Image (cartoon, helix red, strand yellow):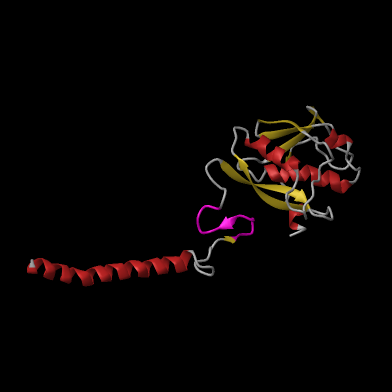
Amino acid sequence: MKRRKKRLAFLHPILYILIGMAVFFAIVYAGEYLIPGGKKNNETPDDTGFLSTGQTPLGINDSTVEVVLYFTDEEFTGLVAEKRLIKKSNNLLESVLQELLRGPQLSSHYSPFPESTRLNGVFTESGVVYVDLSHEMKDKQSGGTTQELLSIFSIVDTLTSLPDVKRIKILIDGKEETTLCGHIDISEPLERDEKLIAEIQ
């Protein structure tokens, strides 16, 4: 009996130490995660608007892809880039064009396309990407050189930012046109032109 009492008396200090350590770590945890002003979220937005933590940006995963869409600035003097995440699909070209026609998300960006312009289809042939648009793309042009230029190269520069896309041919309701409203020749495939982008950066 005396040995048992001595053994219990010896264990008491150890129990006190263990309890003390548990309380200490509980206080530290509370200070880090529960108390206002404790551990901060070190995520900061990058210049694309996505959260950057040194890891994969929020929302980016194996089912999405980041693309660059070109809209116009508020003065309609040049093209401005807008990065966006879209779902991967079997026809990336179509997905990108549909997203472009939906318009910008930033209030300082504007769509260069005439109202009600729709995508009829897109296909690739002999290294050229053919973009077939509805008649509004031609019939509802303002008549000015600037809108015609920006609406065309919004498409061209957006698609040529994708891998292996070099040349774009614009069709209207399945037919080839020489121009939309008399200023820009679209009778031949067009290549990327960054002068409009460089002017406003």
Q: Position of residue 133 (x, y in %)?
A: 78, 33
Marker count (numbered): 0
- Residue farthest to the top? 174
Closer to us: 134 or 32? 32
Residue 109 horizontal/vertical position (percent): 77, 52
Q: Is residue 3 magenta?
A: no
Report the residue at 80% width, 28% height from top: 173
Tell me the residue at 79%/42% (across/down): 152
Is residue 1 or residue 28 the one in the foreground? 1
Give the residue furthest to the front: 1
Point out the stretch of residues depicted in magenta.
45-57
- Picture residue at 65% right of the left edge, 34% below the top: 127
Task: Relative to 155, say whether 22 is above or below.
Answer: below
Q: Is residue 50 left or right of residue 171?
A: left
Pick out the residue farthest to the right: 143
Q: Residue 60: give x, y in percent of width and height.
A: 56, 47
Q: Position of residue 117 (x, y in %)?
A: 81, 36
Relative height, residue 23 to residue 169 (above, below): below
Query: Where is residue 135, by image quadrant?
Result: top right
Foreground of the two, 195 or 17: 17
Q: Which quadrant holds the N terminus?
A: bottom left
Observer able to see residue 191: no
Judge left or right: residue 140 versus residue 88.
right
Residue 181, quarter of picture:
top right
Q: What secondary structure predominates along the stretch shown in magenta?
A: loop
Magenta stretch containing residue 51, yes or no?
A: yes
Residue 155 in view here:
yes
In what quadrant of the picture does the C terminus appear? bottom right
